[in-house]
Image: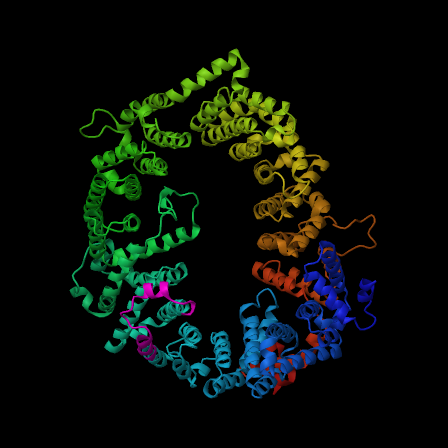
Amino acid sequence: MAAEKLRDLSQPIDVPLLDATVAAFYGTGSKEERNAADQILRDLQNNPDMWLQVMHILQNTQNLNTKFFALQVLEGVIKYRWNALPVEQRDGMKNFISDVIVQLSGNDASFRSERLYVNKLNIILVQILKHEWPARWRSFIPDLVSAAKTSETICENCMVILKLLSEEVFDFSRGEMTQQKIKELKQSLNSEFQLIHELCLYVLSASQRTELIRATLSTLHAFLSWIPLGYIFESPLLETLLKFFPLPAYRNLTLQCLTEVAALQFGNYYDVQYVKMYNIFMVQLQSILPPTSDIPDAYTKGSTEEQAFIQNLALFFTSFYKVHIRILESTQENIAALLVGLEYLINISYVDDTEVFKVCLDYWNSLVSELFEPHRSLDNPAAAATLMGLQVPAMLPGMVDGHGSQLLQRRQLYAGPMSKLRMLMICRMAKPEEVLIVEDENGNIVRETLKDNDVLVQYKIMRETLIYLSHLDHDDTEKQMLRKLSKQLSGEDWTWNNLNTLCWAIGSISGSMMEEQENRFLVMVIRDLLNLCEITKGKDNKAVIASNIMYVVGQYPRFLRAHWKFLKTVVNKLFEFMHETHPGVQDMACDTFLKIVQKCKRKFVITQVGENEPFVSELLTGLPTTIMDLEPHQIHSFYESVGHMIQAESDAQKRDEYLQRLMELPNQKWLEIIGQAHQNVEFLKDQDVIRTVLNILQASSSFLYSGTLYELISKSITEGGPYTSRTSYVKLLRSVKRETLKLIETFLDKAEDQPQIGKQFVPPMMDPVLGDYARNVPDARESEVLSLFATIVNKYKSAMIEDVPRIFEAVFQCTLEMITKNFEDYPEHRLKFFSLLRAIATHCFPALICLSSQQLKLVMDSIIWAFRHTERNIAETGLNLLLEMLKKFQGSEFCNQFYRSYFLTIEQEIFAVLTDTFHKPGFKLHVLVLQHLFCLVETGVVTEALWDVATGPYHYPSNSAFVREFTIKLLSTSFPNMTAAEVTQFVNGLFESTNDLSTFKNHIRDFLIQSKEFSAQDNKDLYAEEAAAQRERERQRMLSIPGLIAPSELQDEMVDS
């Protein structure tokens, strides 16, 4: 009963009853009560007349949740229907909201107690402003400023509104408003800024109220990035800000404002003001935070405010230096202030906080690359030598004059800070990807389980920075690294972290020194690290040192290639680590071994001086002992490494001999298993046997019996019914199946004499693999079958055309049934299925043409199904496949037939996903498909009518005219909130810009934004006069400059005169 009463909006709503319903929704009553209340509130929210009750509700309720509910209803109307409302309703609502805000913020008590409500009202007001201002509410800024002068609390709230407005227009406008609207609002804000500027300065000079000053500084912060520069530098604004900087209550806000000013980029017009600002700032900073302070320690112990201050300080320095560092390089006084600032920044860089460090690192990277760049362009042998890593005396005769001398002076100026920066980089070096051994939160050394992407990104930037630093002064880099390493050996500086960061830094500068210097440096480093490994006790310590030795040697293949003795020592050391059971050590040893072999493989297959046989032969003799303690996956990696070595042997006979020796162990095991299987197939069902088979398959290439084995497994899976595929035994069997498929795929992909292999291997696989896929229960179908055939098609291209119908018959229908029930099941099959289709479309297109129309319809339906996915990879594969198909059909003799069947369907489906926010990532491809379709009809490639001539009411002049009309109808019905004129304008614009992709794309972007709003025709009419006046002024200007308007376009009488 109560529900019906609430739903009847023909009379004013019963506010106490609404309060009770909202209370029930948020209350702790039964689930049924909450659901019932939820249903009523949803119904009210969806009722188009509900917003007319908003004023009545807000005036009569004390409940904050009810107020929020009413404002939510109003927000929806403002966003989507505002322009379609009658003028008096819009004005009524606008005045009502303004009055409530003034009333609540006019007195201190209600402003504090109703803070949340006022904030929400402010947001609503700004949403209204986006539609009304400047055209229909010209006096908004003057009204706001005069209201602000009536009371300090109103003034504080006005600052909040201004800040919101600035953020809406400058920060969040993309995708919310059309480009034209954003431009209008920006111009209005700019032209009316003087009033706002005066108000801010007035508050900062006259008010004693802390909250008001903070609100004003916060608003200024939002405005400073875009206001006209005169307001900053030609007014007392900067001085005022610098006065507030020393005061603790305003320190952070002021610093944020100064950072915005520091980041402004324009010519050198205001350099004097910048130098003055920097110097005053530095004097004040030294009294707040003396240069001798231990900043990292202060940060750790500091309050949230103090930590924010250090973070803001980093932002200020980096912003200022990025744009204005050169103006501080002029006089001795400025240079001194600059060096003090850099010292502060280096100290801040030691703060143990990722965000602070990122800010500093980003700047250090840009500074060192800026110092390094000019030396590459100096056309001077000495400069080139410096770059290559040779040290040059401080001043060279050829460089004293002009440009070179300035560069050297600049480098000298920064030599001190750069040396400290090298130490910082060495101490804080991030962990490279190859290192698998880490310290966990309990201080234990463990194998890393998850890769941290942030750390990897940081490593890349630090590595680049350190390489620049190394180029700027190789000797200093080497000296600092070796000094730190000797402290590790002597034990005075020994910790896991210190050794790690040092070795990561040493590894990261590989290749930046001249070879001679690098060799000298590395001999010392590796010798010291091997010594450290000998003298240090404790398993964990040894694991850390081992990890570092492996990382460093893996980074310097050039050195290892040139020094066989070192290479052999290092590889034998790796074999030693392969018996070390500490978590992560064996993995890293196998990874490093693979890395070194890939870079030095030739060295292992030739007989080195002082050796009796190539290293690979020695290795194969000791193989069983070397891999004795390794896990299966590590053995696979080891086998891969030896495979690389063998591949480097140019003598085919030796290569085969090595291969045979390498595969002796797995082949022996394989033959045993197959022999037993021949006597009794049941033997293959033992889980341990299956595991062994799996390992052999993963390590080798013996798939002579794979086919038999494959069928046997499928049979076991099928016999067990639908749920067998979940048991662990069957999971093992399926792994063997998958590995067999992957093995065949790799073999075919890498095989050299292709056509033979294709003929020899592909036909016999058709039945065991394809037939099995078709016959199996869905859960037992391997997605690898699809990727195997995609590889085959991509490899043998058009040779596979005859086999396509067979592939289709086996996989197409049954896979589609699996993946079109919903968008979630069988994700692997989805992606691989569409990749297979794409391979066929690219290489075996004639086979697609031969499909029956029923089968082709299935293909097209499946492509549409693909790009409807919200899963990005699948949708992208589908769209790429669609583009491929469209282009292929365009060039074939079936062009007309195909487009007559599918043109309109594709257009409709693409518009459906284009206007669905879940498909935003596909925007670029959606645009390309639409551009392709519209180009087809514009250029007349499709020669037959796209409309149904038999049933069509009348004849269209061309396909282009028909598609225009079809698109306009389609969009008008889909977006009833857009006027017919707007839709027509959009569609015409698309057809006009088919040849210019960026205009075409922008056009669609604007349409997507517009389609969200109900916009009435009156908007443009309001500007008609101004627009006409503007056009006339422009015409007069052009007339005043001879030749701007062609004489042929001038009126006759003007020419005569």
| Location of residue 110 by image quarter | bottom right
Residue 933 position in % (x across, y down): 65, 52
> Is 1010 a magenta residue?
no
User: x and y percent of residue 779 in the render?
Assistant: 62, 32
Task: Write the start and end of the magenta stretch as one range.
Answer: 280-305
> At 46% across and 83% down in the image, what residue appears?
231
Residue 767 picture quarter: top right
Quarter of the image that includes the C terminus: bottom right
**Depth check: 902 or 493 in front?**
493
Residue at the extreme front of the image, as rendered = 29
Residue 557 lies left or right of residue 918; in this view the side is: left
500 or 599: which is nearer to us?
500
Specify the principal SS of the magenta part.
helix
Q: Is residue 97 visible?
A: yes
Residue 1045 in view, yes or no: no
Q: Is residue 380 above or below residue 622?
A: below
In the rendered structure, the answer to whether residue 172 lies left or right of residue 703 reads right
Where residue 199 appears, x then y in whole percent?
52, 85
Q: Quadrant of the N terminus?
A: bottom right
